[in-house]
Structure formats: structure tokens, C-alpha cells
Image (tube, rainbow, N blue to C red):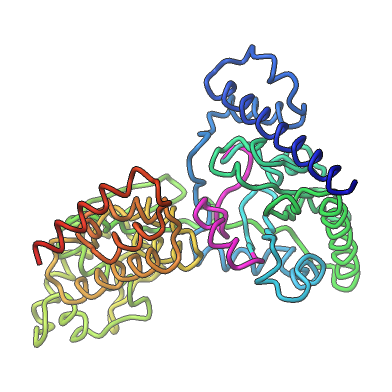
Amino acid sequence: MAASWNASRDAHTEASRLFVERAHEELISGNLDDQRLQQVRPLVRESWERSIRNGVCHEGLPAFALAAEELERYRLAHPLASVMDMIRALLLPGESAESEVIVAVGDQAGRLLWVEGDLAMRLQFGEIGFVAGADWSERAVGTTAPGIALEVGESVQVRLAEHYNSLVHPWSCTAAPVRDPETHHVLGVIDISGGDIAASRQAQMLVDATARAVESELLVARLRERTSAVVSPPTRAETGTVRGILHVLGRDRALLETGTEHGERVIELSARHAAIMLMLAVHPHGLSAERLAELVYGEDASPDTLRPEMVRLRKVLERTACGLTPESRPYRLPMPLETDAHDVLSLLDRGAYRVALSAYRGPVLPESASPGVEEFREVVRTSLREAMISGAGLEVLLAYAETPEARDDVEVLWLALEMLPPRSPKRAGLVARIERLEADR
């Protein structure tokens, strides 16, 4: 009897999933008059409609609102940092790496600050950009439990194809907002994501109870110290030049982007200036004149060769990005300088392999012969390759195999071939490439 009831329930669940999938397809195709749309849960349908109005892509990856260093500073200062141990104890007891769910905690804007839980799932979720620092608000990725919870101010569940973004269709989630216990303003959101268990009735009860426990703990702590405040990342208007980023991937002449209270500015650097700025970004604690000359010009290079170039670089930056004018003794930048290459390395560290591959636009300053640049170029290339081989899913690995770096990489092609299903039509193309490469050896 129980087996018959379970089979009936599973059949009903599958029929519901297919129905929602077809309704979602009609929505994306623009057929808004399809009657199936009116039979989708109002909570989900209204979120779909908001997502369309906001121009959300239904299959894209989320943007990264917080870079690695900014993320670390921000979440350490966020009010929910003080209750993370409680959240872990309530939602990830025992061996969290084998919990079969992902627990994410985000801020009031939908930016994920902590993503923890089942290790295998974290790797899969990393491929769709569900990692710390990513923007998972409804305006960024459409219908999800954390996004809707922040929009409507209450706990919600989203199952499978109810998600607006098709990349998230295999998963389900439950989320609840966390409010300031005194002002009742939303501080953030707690989310459980994973398989069917993540959208069960028990999951919703547990997430709700955790949110209420967190609010009570915040109130108790506040009564002890009356010093808590909602912290947001500093704006450019508050701090002047607060961010600089050097774009070096796939470019021989780097682009330097800076932001001030007066707006953003982008300048193109010469090949030599690009190498110098990259080395200063890679070595934020500073370099002696002798060491910087070696990294830029080669072994036994004289600092006298470097100094005139530094004078020219300073003049360029004083006119265009004075907040990044290098200091001397040692040579160093007065503020952190991010690079798009470091962003890729950070994404790989967080398991966001699909996003990292999308962000990788080619080798670091590919034509530069500076020893320091060549070394860093190899670090980035090797890190990407090792991550793809050791942790990426099949789709990401196949995409990597089409990049110039991996097109002739037999090990990558063999791994992709082993991962493909036996009847996949893609196997023939991989076999042909492998045979050609091995014949050329």
C-alpha cells in the first residue's frame, strides 16, 4: 500500500514539474496568453512577470557584486556575521560537507555572503554561480527562494522549473528573510538549496525557526552592547577613489579602470606600464627597485632602466588616476588594485568554474616577455586547467576544451570523452580530435 502511494505521489510530482516547465517555456517565448501561466502558483507567476519587466536573462550567470577582498571585509562587518555559528549549528549539524543541502546567507540586497554545506553540491552550485559574492537578487537572476523572500518579506519555497533561470531548474530551495529585531528592516536572507528535501515542509519550518532564533540572538546581543548597525560596502562618494581594476586577460595593452565620486574612468596603458602595474598588483606589499626591474626587464636588469619608466608612468597616473600613483622605497601602490586575472583565480577558489571560464578572456598580457608577467600568466593558466580537470562538470569541461589553451590538450579531451554518455553524438568529434593529435606526436 505504501509503495503504491509513493508511486502515485512521484507520478503527480513529475506531472507537476512538466506542467511548470511547459508554462515556463511559454513565458520565455513571449506567449503570455497561454492558459498554463494562469495555473502556475501566483507567487511564482508574479515573480516571473517582475523578472521579465526587469529584463532578467533566463539562462545567464549571475554578476559578482562583491570581489574577494571586498567580500571578506563586508561580511566580517555585517550583523549576520555574529550569528553564523548559530546558523551552522541549526542547519548544518554534524558533517556539513555531507549534509545533502547547501546553506546560503545573503544580505538585504540579495548578495550571497556565505555558501556552505554539502561539498559535492557546492561544486555543482558553483557552476551556476551560486557562490559567495554573487548577486542572487530577483533583479539579477529572477525567481528564486532568496530573491522572492527579500521581495515579499516572508519565507518562500521554489521548486525545480519554477525558477526563472533555466540553469537552476534541477534544484529546489527554501528561504526566509532575517529582520532587525528593533527596526524590523530586512538584514538579509537564509536559504537552503538542494534536491527535493530542500523544499519540503520540514525545511520551511526549520528555516523559519532559524530566522527567528537569529533575530532573538541579535536582540540579546544588542541589549548587551548597543553598538550594532547595518553595514554596507563603502560608496565611491564616501571614500573618493575606492576601487581600481586592471584588465590584463587576452590584452597586450592593459586597461586600467578607476572609480571616484566623479564617476569612472578607463585608460589604456602601454605594454611596459601594464607590466609594471601588474607586478605591483601581484605584490601589494611592495618591491625594491632591483626586484621590480628584474620582474619587468629580466635578470640582472639595472634599476636605472626602470626609474625613467616609473617617472613616465607616474605622470600618466597623476593625470588620469592619481589615487594609484606608485609610492617609492619600496615601489608599491597606495591602494589595492584588483585585476581580472585575480577575479578568475578567486572564482576558481570558490568553485564557480563555469563563471571563471566565462570570465577568462585569454592569457595574461599574452605578448609580454617580462619574467614576472610570464610567471603570473602560467599561474593563471595552470590554475584554470587544474580546476577544469579536477572539479568542473561535463558541460564546463567541454566548453574549456574549445578554448585555445585546451584545444590540443589530449588529457582534457580524454577526460571529456570518459564523462560523456555512451550514446552522445559529441563522442565522435572528440575521438577524431584525439586521434589527430596523437597521430601528430
Look at 76% across and 73% down and name the residue there: 85
Between residue 253 and residue 224, name the one nearer to us.
Answer: 253
In which quadrant of the rendered image does the C terminus lie?
bottom left
Using residue 127 as the reference point, say whether residue 367 is left or right of it: left
Q: Position of residue 145 (x, y in %)?
A: 71, 44
Look at 12% across and 70% down and name the residue there: 369
Q: Which image quadrant for residue 417?
A: bottom left
Can you say whether 149 is above or below 308 in the image?
A: above
Q: Position of residue 120 (x, y in %)?
A: 58, 65
Is residue 224 part of the magenta span, yes or no?
no
Is residue 134 part of the magenta span, yes or no?
yes
Can you say whether 186 is above or below 273 in the image?
A: above
Q: Which residues are magenta?
A: 116-140
Q: Which image quadrant for residue 334?
A: bottom left
Q: Position of residue 183 (x, y in %)?
A: 85, 50
Look at 72% across and 58% down and name the residue there: 230
